Amino acid sequence: MALGALAGCEAPQGVPAPFTPEYGKIETRLLDGDLVNFVVNMRGARGPDDVAAYAECAAAQYALIRGYGFARHLRTNVDEEGGLWRADAVYTISPALPRGLKTIDAEVVVFDCAENGIPMV
């Protein structure tokens, strides 16, 4: 009986633990004109994509706050230490769709971030 009771407390094999992120602060630095650096941190990320998505949400909201509709991703560096994930991302913001492959429509991304419970600037 004791084994059955103990087994009932464990997550079923192959089922991932629930995603319960803790979003930390967002630092925004205007580098030059339309070039912006975002540094975000969080705990409980499932991997680098979660913290990169947090940075993208910050960039999209920032673009809208500044009166722009688009952003272009330039780079994101992600690291993790002791369960704290950190992303250092750089984006350009613009009023029109910029050239390049990694462009985002700020309104669409902000809507998606709100739907997924990811906080923004």
Image (tube, rainbow, N blue to C red):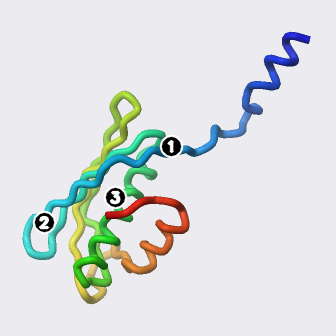
**Spatial distance from mark 1 to mark 2, Cα to Cα?**
29 Å
What amino acid is found at the position of numbered circle 1 in the picture? Answer: Arg
Query: Where's residue 102, x and y in %?
Result: 34, 71
The quadrant of the rendering that contains the N terminus is top right
Q: Are marks 3 and 2 in contact (CB under 8 Å)?
A: no
What amino acid is found at the position of numbered circle 3 in the picture? Answer: Ala
Q: Are marks 1 and 2 in contact (CB under 8 Å)?
A: no
The quadrant of the rendering that contains the C terminus is bottom left
Q: In the figure, 69 relative to 41: above or below?
A: below
Q: Mark 3 vs mark 2: which is more N-terminal?
A: 2
Query: Where's residue 41, x and y in %?
Result: 33, 46
Query: Which label is found at residue 55?
Result: 3
Tell which of 115 and 73 is nearer to you.
115
Residue at image position (13%, 66%) is: 30
Q: In the figure, 8 relative to 89: above or below?
A: above
Residue at image position (29%, 67%) is: 73
In this rendering, would 2 be left or right of 12?
Answer: right
Tell which of 19 and 52 is nearer to you.
19
Q: In the figure, 87 relative to 59: above or below?
A: above
**SS class of the residue under badge 1?**
loop
What amino acid is found at the position of numbered circle 2 in the picture? Answer: Leu
List the residue tagged with mark 2.
30
**Spatial distance from mark 3 to mark 1, Cα to Cα?**
15 Å
Eye-nearest disc, 1 or 2: 2
Residue at image position (36%, 36%) is: 84
Query: Where's residue 110, x and y in %?
Result: 42, 72
Q: Mark 1 vs mark 2: which is more N-terminal?
A: 2
The residue sitting at the top extreme is 2
**SS class of the residue under badge 3?**
helix
List the residue tagged with mark 1.
46
**Spatial distance from mark 3 to mark 2, Cα to Cα?**
15 Å
Please tell me how crowded label 1 is: few (under 14), some (14-19), or many (20+) other residues with Cα within 10 Å: some
